[in-house]
Image (cartoon, grey):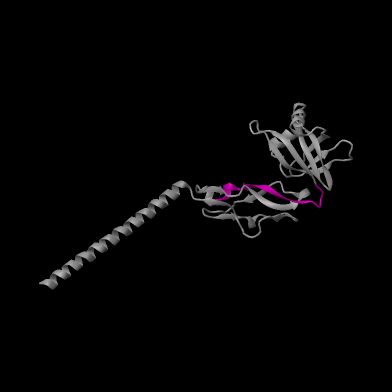
Amino acid sequence: MAETDVFHCEPRKRTGTGGARAVRRDGWTPGVLYGGGEEPVAIRLRSNEVLKAFMHGRLRPQLAKIDVPGEDGQQPVIPRDVQIHPVKGFPIHVDLMRVNEKTRIDVEVPVRFINEDDSPGLKRGGVLNVVRHAIDIYAPATAIPDIFEIDVTGLEIGDAVHVSSIALPDGVTLVTTDRDYTVATIAAPSALKSSDDAADDEAEGAEAGEDDEAAEAAEGGDGEDSGDSES
């Protein structure tokens, strides 16, 4: 289970570009708190807490908590819209959505492949070709999986992993249900592909040569037959 971040926040009186810049100068990150049947509220979050979550890959749709002054307890929230500075690469605005055990949302959950040493195909030099780095699911906001682990034990070159092979927790469903799409394949190494292509070309060349010889023989036979008829 991933660490649950707690964001301390304060109401933000000034909004707009000027207000956001002033908030950042004071060491805070501007944001908006919304959802839960309440009106959206402009807030500011401690930048060090936001940056820590971002650097550890947790500033994405996963359960966190927010500590709001004047309110009892910590509210469960989900980071939804995170704006990143285009040059410096750190968060400059964060939207948080209030959630509870009844809230269900669409989220992307990353995949991780395990037991690669137990894949005969990879041992032979095959390449793990990842088609989908994340799976779209529909899940309770308070029970979003951190990651999906996919076991590649026993997979040979040419084998594929489909989304149907992923075990989903209770209450979690796939967003895409009309097809069993491919998540990853064990592809042949380039050297093997090259040798196979060369063998195919050689076989095609041999077949073409045999066809040419047969055609020449047929043409020669026709010529002799016509000569005999003239004599």
For image coordinates 38% across by 51% down, the residue present is: 198
Instruction: Say whether residue 171 is left or right of residue 163.
Output: right
Using the rendered view, name the quadrant where residue 4 is placed: top right
Q: Position of residue 204 (x, y in %)?
A: 35, 57
Residue 171 lies, with reference to residue 14, above or below; the image says below
Using the rendered view, name the quadrant where residue 94 is placed: top right
Q: Position of residue 135 (x, y in %)?
A: 65, 50
Q: Which residues are magenta?
A: 99-120
Which sits in the foreground, 93 or 173?
Answer: 93
Residue 12 lies in the magenta stretch: no
Residue at the top extreme, as displayed: 25
Which sits in the foreground, 112 or 92?
Answer: 92
Q: Position of residue 127 (x, y in %)?
A: 52, 47
For image coordinates 44% across by 50% down, the residue present is: 193
Residue 100 lies in the magenta stretch: yes
Q: Quadrant of the N terminus?
A: top right
